[in-house]
Image: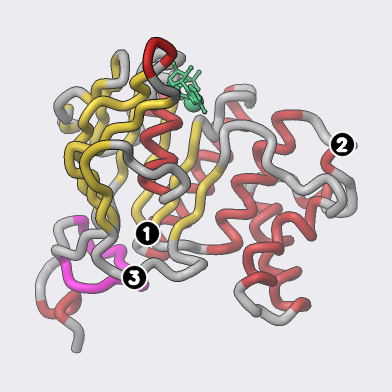
Amino acid sequence: MSRADAVPGRHGPARGRTGPPDEVLVECRDAAVTFGQGAHAVVAVHGASLTVRPGDRLAIVGPSGSGKSTLLHLLAGLERPTGGTVVRPAPAGPRDIGLVFQSDSLIPALDVVENTALPLILADVPEERARRAALDALALVAADDLAERLPEEISGGQAQRVAAARVLAQAPRLVLADEPTGRLDHATGSRVLDALLMAADRTGAALVVTTHDPAVAARFGTRRTMRDGRLLAAEEAS
Ligand SMILES: Nc1ncnc2c1ncn2[C@@H]1O[C@H](COP(=O)(O)OP(=O)(O)OP(=O)(O)O)[C@@H](O)[C@H]1O
Ligand SMILES: [Mg+2]
């Protein structure tokens, strides 16, 4: 029996590939990002401190340009802090962190199902299995009918759903989604959000999203606001 079985989890029973209840997936300690130098320097994130554990549901809200994407990229390891530290106590494998990018991220030469399967292929999952997992994930975001199309043949909102499916297929322990509903109508956005939340519940993953939409943020247990690069204190859901 693992420690996760012996000790009731902080986040309820839905725990999949998880370790000890106090396990930390990623922690920012006073992490900062400054772009450029001298007079042109832009401080995108001022000393942010944040800990993400398995099962966490965190929404980062704030106006355009407040540093939400930069903070998410710090958590993903795509951006290095120019101040402070970002710590991942457990060694992150290639499939441990999945990022749904805010802007176009599909590979133009690959069709939708190939794009969705790519992280699995890169992780040496056999092609047929990767393809099936990709089609299942596309169905979750109502994009399976687009499987054979190229990125240039789909809309911006459809591309965003494919980017979400690509992370769902990968089933990482830490799911980071940068305004995953930003280009979607209400019904389609709800469907994508449902798919992300259900997948995270099933696998015990942590889910961190950025959003402008209060209705999206309301579905998350913890909400943090960013303003001018500063991460304000936590607002716990009642
Ligand atoms: N690569 C970069 N080089 C220089 N400045 C950057 C870079 N990326 C972001 N910035 C600046 O850092 C600040 C924060 O940007 P960021 O993309 O994190 O904001 P955001 O909250 O995600 O905004 P949005 O809601 O519009 O997506 C902005 O002032 C932006 O112009
Ligand atoms: Mg952004």
Q: In which quarter of the image is the N terminus?
A: bottom left
Please state the extent of the stretch shown in magenta in the rendering: 11-21
Mark 3 residue type: Pro
Q: Earlier in the sequence, mark 3 or mark 2?
A: 3
Which residue position holds label 3?
91
- Disc 1 secondary structure class: loop
10 Å neighbourhood of mark 1: few (<14), some, or many (≥20)? many
Residue 42 in which image quadrant: top left
- Disc 2 secondary structure class: helix
Residue 41 in which image quadrant: top left
Marking on residue 205: 1
Q: For the view shown, which residue lies furthest in the front direction?
A: 38
Which residue position holds label 2?
152
Quick check: 107 above or below 43? Answer: below
What is the x, y in percent for residue 130?
Answer: 70, 72
Q: Distance between the residues labelled 1 and 2?
A: 32 Å
Mark 2 residue type: Glu
Marking on residue 131: none
Quick check: 101 above or below 165? Answer: above
Q: Does the residue labelled 3 lie within 8 Å of ligand 1?
A: no
Quick check: 61 above or below 132? Answer: above
Q: How far apart are marks 1 and 3 (CA)?
A: 16 Å
Query: Which mark's residue is nearer the viewer, 1 or 2?
Result: 2
